[in-house]
Amino acid sequence: MSLTYPSPAPGTENATGSAVVPRTYQVRTFGCQMNVHDSERMAGMLEAAGYVPADGAQADVVVFNTCAVRENADNKLYGNLGQLAPIKAANPGMQIAVGGCLAQKDRETILKKAPWVDAVFGTHNVGALPALLDRARHNNEAQLEILESLDVFPSTLPTKRDSVYSGWVSISVGCNNTCTFCIVPALRGKEKDRRPGEILAEVQALVDDGAIEVTLLGQNVNSYGVEFGDRQAFSKLLRACGEIPGLERVRFTSPHPAAFTDDVIDAMAETPNVMPQLHMPLQSGSDKVLRDMKRSYRSAKFLGILDKVRARMPHAAISTDIIVGFPGETEEDFQATLDVVEKSRFATAFTFQYSKRPGTPAADLPDQLPKAVVQERFERLTALQDRIAAEENAKQLGRRVEVMVTAQSGRKSEETHRLSGRSQDQRLVHFTVPEGAPAPRPGDLVTVTITEAAAFHLVADPASAGDYSLRRSRAGDAWDRAQADSCGVPAPAAAGSSGKSGVSLGMPSLPVRSR
């Protein structure tokens, strides 16, 4: 289709040959941590091509990084595109691009439903974004480019990190599993592993820039090494991260219970900077449903893994994913899930109602459950998990915890004057700074005593300055430098205001639960 652009386009030279203001961009992200990290790459490539963050103003280029796994993902995308249609009509130089999993799946459908979109690209060619935008402007025509396999490993692309104090590092992309509910293997392809040296070099580069926390990413991190034939590659990688000076917190997501081995548990327990936190997807507590899902483990194996983890790390916080209402799930099957959840004592559970995903085997299974049945079971599950989460958090009362301060504060921070951060086990902690005590920056670490507990957060209100300890960190220094670079002056000492970024996340960095 044809698109209309004014001449000259924003960000080029005008008729007199003098430079005009650079084009601005915004990336809107929906979906998982892999999408969040991909959005950092999109932002990095756009900035390398001369674009600048929109910083609240209407952007010249809006990029949607989409998800095809979450419920109503397509409705969310087309709703957002619809909202932008009149804005673009009033600003012909504006461009809209759609990438990610839904773009990989829907392809031409996006341009048919939203003909005002300028570029559509898939999960395998993130690096093509700037070129597609240029071609769309030059040819006055929408560009569609979807590759079936990676043209270049994404981590070799420029990256604009969303945070200076912590970062994501991909160790692999794709997945070799065949879970019947999941469309990810079809959209991201078979697992492709990075070499350990490349991963450690990226981690080192993040630390050199000031980060003190790194999260290793993969669709199935503990199968890392399958491509080059080392079954213990992931545990070796964790131990190698422990040798990097200045790296204080190492996390990873997500493992698969079927491939989770004792050497990984040992590496977690014996590597001081690997945090006592584990995300272990359950999906269902029913062995029958697990078979139907093609999840190659059973509930007894799952619970056995948790027992081993807690034997080595008694204070580990364990989170999970659970799907309610999978086709053919009986009341007996659902009760089995409730039983496993009760035994597992999850700190957090991300719970989802099953919904059909075209292209997945589960979409064609018989005995699809009525919405009312799924909703009722979902409410029972979340009520149970809410109770367990509150009970587990109550055990934290009186504990001294080290909290890494984040740039985001709680919804009631203006009323409570509390700052926020994450403990070593990833629990969300809201805390106050005693009068007269020094205030932290994002990336600094404070040690406080937990005084209140709720299902989804902890509170620490020190009674005196003696109950509050601040450790200024290299990450806090990096925050100050980033603020100076973007604003021309150092950031104020108090946390709570986020830095400027061209990446707008469509999900919290760690939601407690999806309803």
Image (cartoon, rainbow, N blue to C red):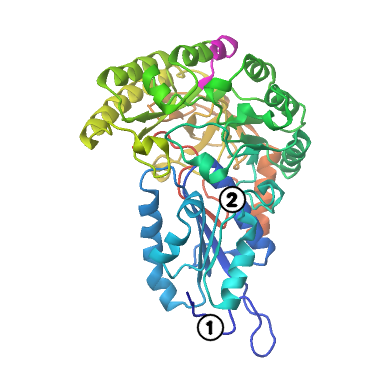
The reply, left or right, for residue 363 in relation to residue 198 is left
Q: Quadrant of residue 116?
A: bottom left
Residue 174 at what x, y percent from top left?
A: 59, 39
The residue identified by callout 2 is: 148
Q: In the rendered view, would you say 297 is above or below 141?
A: above
Q: Position of residue 153 (x, y in %)?
A: 68, 47
Give the extent of the magenta segment.
Answer: 308-317
Choose between 409 and 342: the one closer to the eye: 342
Residue 206 or residue 195, whichever sits in front = 195
Looking at the picture, which amino acid does disc 1 mark?
Pro
Q: Nearer the viewer, residue 279 or 494?
A: 279
Mark positioned earlier in the residue sequence (2 or 1) = 1
Q: Which residue lies furthest to the left in this view?
A: 372
Q: In this view, does 367 lie to the left or right of 456?
A: left
Regarding residue 354, the answer to whether it shows in the image is: no
Residue 448 placement (x, y as % from top left): 54, 26
Say if 328 sits above or below 410 in the image. Answer: above
Task: Give the numbered dot on residue 301.
Answer: none
How many tags in the picture?
2
Q: Mark 1 points at which residue?
A: 6
- Residue 21: say if magenta: no
**Marks 2, 1: nearer the viewer:** 2
Residue at mark 2 to residue at mark 1: CA–CA distance = 34 Å
